[in-house]
Amino acid sequence: MDITTTIGVNADSARTIAGSVVTTTVSGTNTYFPTGNKEEPGLAVGTVTIHNETSLDQPLIATTRLLSSDDVLFRIKDRVLVPAGGTVKANVYADQEGSGSDIGPTKFTIPGLHDAKQSVIYATSDTAMSGGIRKIGSVSQDDVEKAKKMLAEELKEDAKASLAAKVDSNLLLSVYDVSDPTYTVGATIGEEVSEFTLSANMTVVGVFFSPDDVQTLASDVLMSRAIDDAEYIEPSDAAPVVTLGSYDLERQEAELDVTYTGRATINPESKQLSKIAFYGKTKDEVRRYLLSLDHVYGVDVHLRPAWTQTIPHVADHVDIVVKQVE
């Protein structure tokens, strides 16, 4: 059986627990890709580390050439200063379009330097260059909706971490509501692009509380559903399912909708199973009686010795065994 109840957080209600109701606003931008159906050449890009093994700083202007060990030419995107005896990161782009520039990690010389310097001032890459071939697709509404869903989930995770830092660490359980999301898409539906940006801003409300408090109240409600002493309700091993019903930020209150599962069975200690209820009954009478009770689905009656026809009137000679079945 399932029970559903409402539990208040910091609320003036019959069933209420302590907790925290907090909120934050998060925003972010990410890049997404439309479903591509054609390819076109592009400029491969990547990052290199420039090494300077001399005793003097080495400036390098934007567009400085870097030549890979396989003679693929790249250029530095922005001016950098490579410190003496040190390194610096630099963004680079291929000199020519096409897949030939999508190369793996390698070492680069700097042809613009004197030959003597090229062995002590050089560049290396730890990751592959990419972008020599661009997938072009037409931005669809489905592309945008998928991007919204992904970005919203990322921002929600950021918000959850931010909210958790505001509350007592003992409030281990939480539920959330995302409201007023706004999105800005960096492309129009039908536009052919290799990628598009999506920005989002949203408010996230978090309600934090103790799982033990919820468990206790849910168990109390579940047990109260027993009809009388003839019924026993065994709680599920699974934790209650909690969703956020409503909240009031000004009053720092919330209502939780809680669903909890249990199994109703006959209570072995109930009056209906007292031994005296069976005295003098035949096998058929015992079966009919027991099958008339709730939660009884099968009965086995064994009388010993074999010639015995009715249940004896002696308590020590009567055993009642209740077996649970799935």
Image: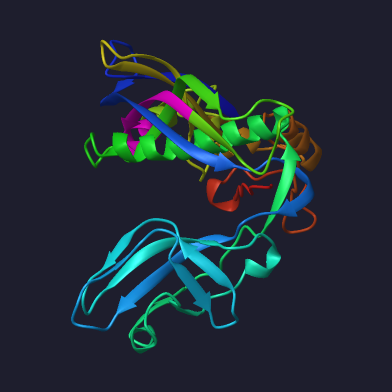
For residue 296, which quarter of the picture?
top right
Task: Note whether 175 is above or below 115 in the view shown.
Answer: above
Left or right, residue 90 beside residue 74: left
Left or right, residue 112 beside residue 43: left
Q: Is residue 214 magenta?
A: yes
Left or right, residue 167 beside residue 314: left
What color scheme is it?
Answer: rainbow
Q: Quadrant of the N terminus?
A: top right
Residue at 68%, 47% in the rendered image:
325
Residue at 28%, 10% in the rendered image:
12
247 vs 301, nearest the viewer? 247
Residue at 42%, 40% in the rendered image:
157
Rendered location of residue 188, percent (x, y): 66, 25
54 vs 135, nearest the viewer? 54
Residue at 80%, 55% in the rendered image:
307
Task: Note whether 171 is above or below 321 in the view shown.
Answer: above
Rendered location of residue 240, percent (x, y): 48, 35
185 vs 71, nearest the viewer? 71
Q: Is residue 273 visible?
A: no
Rendered location of residue 299, percent (x, y): 75, 44
Q: Is residue 17 magenta?
A: no
For residue 173, which quarter of the picture?
top left
Rendered location of residue 322, percent (x, y): 62, 46
Q: Write down the region rendered in magenta.
A: 200-216
